[in-house]
Amino acid sequence: MKAPDFDYCRPGTLAEALSLLAGADGEAQPLAGGQSLMPMMNFRVAAPEILVDLAGIPELRGIARQGDMLRIGAMTTYRELQDDPALQAVPLIAMALPHIAHDAVRNRGTIGGSLALADAAAEMPALMMTLNAVIELAGPDGPREVPATEFFLGYYETACEPDELLVAVRVPVAQPGEVFGFHELVQRHGDYAMAGVAIRATGVAPIAGLAVGFFGVSDRALRVPAFEEALTGTDGSEAAIAAALPKLDAIEFEGDTKISAETRRHYAGVALKRALKEMLA
Amino acid sequence: MTGPATIFDRPNTYIGKPEPRADAARLLQGRGRYVDDLNLPRMVHAAFVRSPHAHARIRAIDVTEARAAPGVLAVYTGADIAAEVTPYVGTLTHMAGLRSAPQYPLAVDVARWQGEPLVMVVARSRAQAEDACDLIDADLEELEAVCDQETALSPDSPLIHEEFGSNLAWERLVEAGDVDTAFAAPGVTVVERTFRFGRHTGVTLESRGTVCDYDPSENQLTMYYSGQAPHMMQVILSKHLGLPEEDVRVISNDVGGSFGIKIHTYGDEIAAAVAARMLRRPVKFIADRMESFMTDIHARDHVVTARIGVTAEGNIVGIDMDDLTGIGPFSMYPRTSAIECNQVLNLTGAPYALQNYRARGRVVFQNKMLMCQYRAVGHPIAMAVADGLLEEAGRAIGMDPVALRKKNLMADDSYPRQSASGMKLDDLSHQKAITKLTEIMDYDALRTDQAEARKRGVYRGIGLVSMVEVTNPSPMFYGIGGAPIASQDGATARLDAGGALHVASSITEQGQGTNAILAQIAAGVFGVPIDRVRVTTGDTRNVPYGGGTWASRGAGIGGEAMLQAAHALRDQVLEVAGTLLQTTPEALDIRDGNVVDAGTGAERMTLADLARTVYYRGNELPSDTKPELIATRHYRVTDFPFVFTNGAMAAHVEVDIETGFVKVLHFWAVEDCGRVINPMLVDEQVRGGVVQGIGGALYEECLYSPEGQLLNTTMADYIVPMAAEMPDITVAHIETPSKTSVLGAKGAGEAGTGGAPAAILNAVNDALSPLGASLWQMPMTPQRVLTALSEG
Ligand SMILES: Cc1cc2nc3c(=O)[nH]c(=O)nc-3n(C[C@H](O)[C@H](O)[C@H](O)COP(=O)(O)OP(=O)(O)OC[C@H]3O[C@@H](n4cnc5c(N)ncnc54)[C@H](O)[C@@H]3O)c2cc1C
């Protein structure tokens, strides 16, 4: 498993990186932490002719508080997130981080890489959707913003065009009274979730302002508005959950070599129940 | 066995001590010498195009573009390689009736499993070789594949080898007593279950690999080999490449795990040797992880339907079983793929005093990767079937599984004796082991906790196994059937001028600490501090002739040879010392590097003084004194086909009935491997084995599509146990030394892997039993647990 030949460049500015991408006619690919891209290249399922390493671009780094938003540069690693006190303002991310892979991967893997890759079982996309984050992109025609809820389009497919870069993500900080829940089902710690859920609510008795992001259930991270509505205004009891769960019909649950689609659907419900229980406790 | 029995009481013995391994620092500092670390001048790299289909006829292969690709030196098809080697057939004469077809390193006309090598590309780098592989156009006609072993024998199944007329490779029936009559007797409850054991594989940290170096000036082939049996490989290369044995040298430096994966003949490795000879330059082949999953031997893959009969008082009257196992399209060369099934028939119920036993085994061909000997060959199946049935029978008659075992396990004072399948048994301690096990796990307290937990809706289970392990095989295992595999091992001990002891052995180190125990034995028996011992293993040119390390034979056989060699050298040195010191050898001893007065321990001379006198100033010795400061001894097991060990293990699990996840809370293993040479290493062998057993029970399975496509070829899809999920594993010992050697060591390497699956199976079913559910398929995945619950 050796990658095919490729050229490598390491631009020092965002503009330089964008012009490299624009000039490559779709044959260039950005390299962030490489924790997903390098294995894909070694398996020869990805074969970019040019790797544009984003490690030397200052514009893609840093965590900064901007009013009610926390702006996280695309090249911020999971490790940097875990270590930064500013993250206390976004407890949901802090709750999820220990579940993402293992130390070695967290030391290199980046939030931008995870969002740009859009693995259906990854945590970050679902978190960003749940938190109503805003994704900042930059391309040949300048910067643009896409709400996280509109960013993930399908299997490894996002609103980010091949000549664009994900620059940062802006995440609303927690408001007083807001509560969060997180649960994922894995056979081994650090594995991709067999089903997972992230929850945000502005009130709990009854549940108000509810957002529920699912991951590891279908071809992408997703929220189901009808399901959120069905749970809103309830006390989050098992009965209320049971009444709301049929709304997950909107999700096309997928089976794999480990579990059937039906089991995955069941798991989504179990994860939801457990996350909610812990959140309301 | 007579011999120097006082060895173990000597002042500077290391046997029985938790000596740290000498090579740990080197390996941890990255100074290991694994095959891939080797870079020889002019070395080139091999990659393979492999069959994408489980069964396909090769119509044509176009390699023109690949030949012209950058860096490519050669492209060889199956026919090119076949012209340079003789084919091999994985049969042995003592496995009566076993058949297999001739096999070449690369597929010639027909590819018979997905992953079988079709074309070899040799280039200046592995990346260039892989680039060229992408340019090869193989025109293949897909043939119907035989994948399901349960339909492989049906008359309308396609055939893998037309000439055999069926897909049956081997069949055996073992019968003792009269099961039918025993089961029909009044008051006998008969329980029947069908067990399924998934395929899994060894997943060594260092993948398979070789560097083959051919020197035409001497017609000398050197194979650097990540493997367990250098002398076996030497014979195989010699025989099939047509080279004199003495012109083939096989070297195993550090080996990063093996587990039985690396004792077989792999086409890609043989092809690397062929290419090296044709190109007259070193060729490296390192299997990548995907190739490891697709082409390392797989194991298990059994479907067993079995019955047990038990009286109301808990007397087991018999076991009746039928084992069907799929082995891939060929029997693996040279050890054959019928051994696992054979072991299942030999070992099922072997801990118990059974009067009536009937076991049928059928081994069938299928279009999947070849199956062969992997750690604890056959044991997990035999133990899970017997002890799974036993605990199910206990539930049926309302008897506690510990009481039921105690009632039926062979008595500790009843040896030597035979098992129902005819195995000769001696020096076992089943009753002591189960008693000790229930003490260390506090069995009664766990049962109380279990009852409490159930009231809270928490489903915990306790499962046990009483087991035997086949170790220290005699020539009856392979040699008798014509395999070029030594059953004896040799050891050499040499005193150097500086007073250091250099030892060499034909057993091999693959990460388990073989070299450490050899040093311990040699140092203590001879009488030097252990840091003055240097150990050489894994080089057919520099070590005595022998079998290597597999079947839990290293310590028991190679260790005994080392003991004998060190003891012989001690006698030789004391002979010289007696002359020099003008006393009798009996009045002297060697301790801590010095010749001492045997009675008082007072130092008489250092070993360095003695050796220097012999080597440099021979004039000081009487002319009729002919000192030999080197000794070699060989050892083989003679009175028994195998030396059996026994043990008892228990698992405590919690089943999350909502998700089907199984959490192992604790594991206990009581092991009787005879004399423990290094308790630290033995405990870690047992723990590592248990973890591998838990892998087979809960996680690991090579999943094939109905068309024979392997679906999980990455470490993300084929999941192995990881540290975070593993329980504490408590290990305890009973030491009943084997009478077959002075050392008295039996094997300890496979017990955990052999026993743990049964204990886990029993624990899960114990947890599920109040819900009326049970599961008899491994691995017990969350999906299968949920399915069992929904059917329960
Ligand atoms: C053993 C292991 C376990 C893992 N477990 C988990 C897990 O449990 N949960 C989880 O979420 N992830 C897991 N991962 C994936 C890991 O989190 C990845 O690192 C992450 O998804 C991608 O981040 P990266 O920085 O490594 O991106 P890279 O691998 O460098 O890139 C990923 C993709 O995104 C593109 N890209 C990267 N940055 C940008 C950008 N700024 N703009 C546009 N495109 C960009 C790349 O071109 C590439 O296509 C695991 C990985 C490993 C190896």
Image: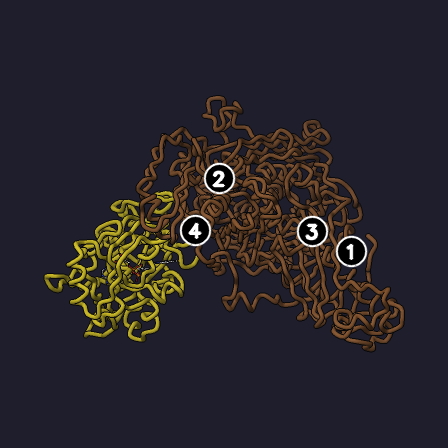
Chain colours: A yellow, B brown
Position of A171 with respect to B448 (left or right) is left
**Residue B369 location (% of width, % of height):** 48, 39
- Of the numbered discs 2 and 4, the one sitting upstream in the chain is 2
Judged by depth in the image, the label closer to the viewer, 3 or 4, is 3
Q: Are marks 2 and 3 in contact (CB under 8 Å)?
A: no
* Measured Cα–Cα span from mark 2 to mark 4: 20 Å
Judged by depth in the image, the label closer to the viewer, 2 or 4, is 2
Q: Are marks 3 and 1 on the same chain?
A: yes
* Crowding at mark 3 (Cα within 10 Å: few <14, some 14-19, many 20+): many
The residue tagged 4 is B289
* Residue B742: mark: 1
Q: Residue at x 32, y 71 (%)?
A: A80
* Crowding at mark 2 (Cα within 10 Å: few <14, some 14-19, many 20+): many
The residue tagged 3 is B489
The answer to whether B494 is drawn above or below residue B246 in the figure is below
The residue tagged 2 is B105
Judged by depth in the image, the label closer to the viewer, 2 or 1, is 2
- Element on which disc 3 rests: strand
Output the chain of dot 4: B
- Of the numbered discs 3 and 4, the one sitting upstream in the chain is 4
Q: Quadrant of ligand 1?
A: bottom left
* Crowding at mark 4 (Cα within 10 Å: few <14, some 14-19, many 20+): many
Q: Which of A4/B155 is in front?
A: A4
**What kind of residue is marked 2?**
Pro
Q: Are marks 2 and 3 on the same chain?
A: yes
- Element on which disc 1 rests: loop
**What kind of residue is marked 1?**
Val
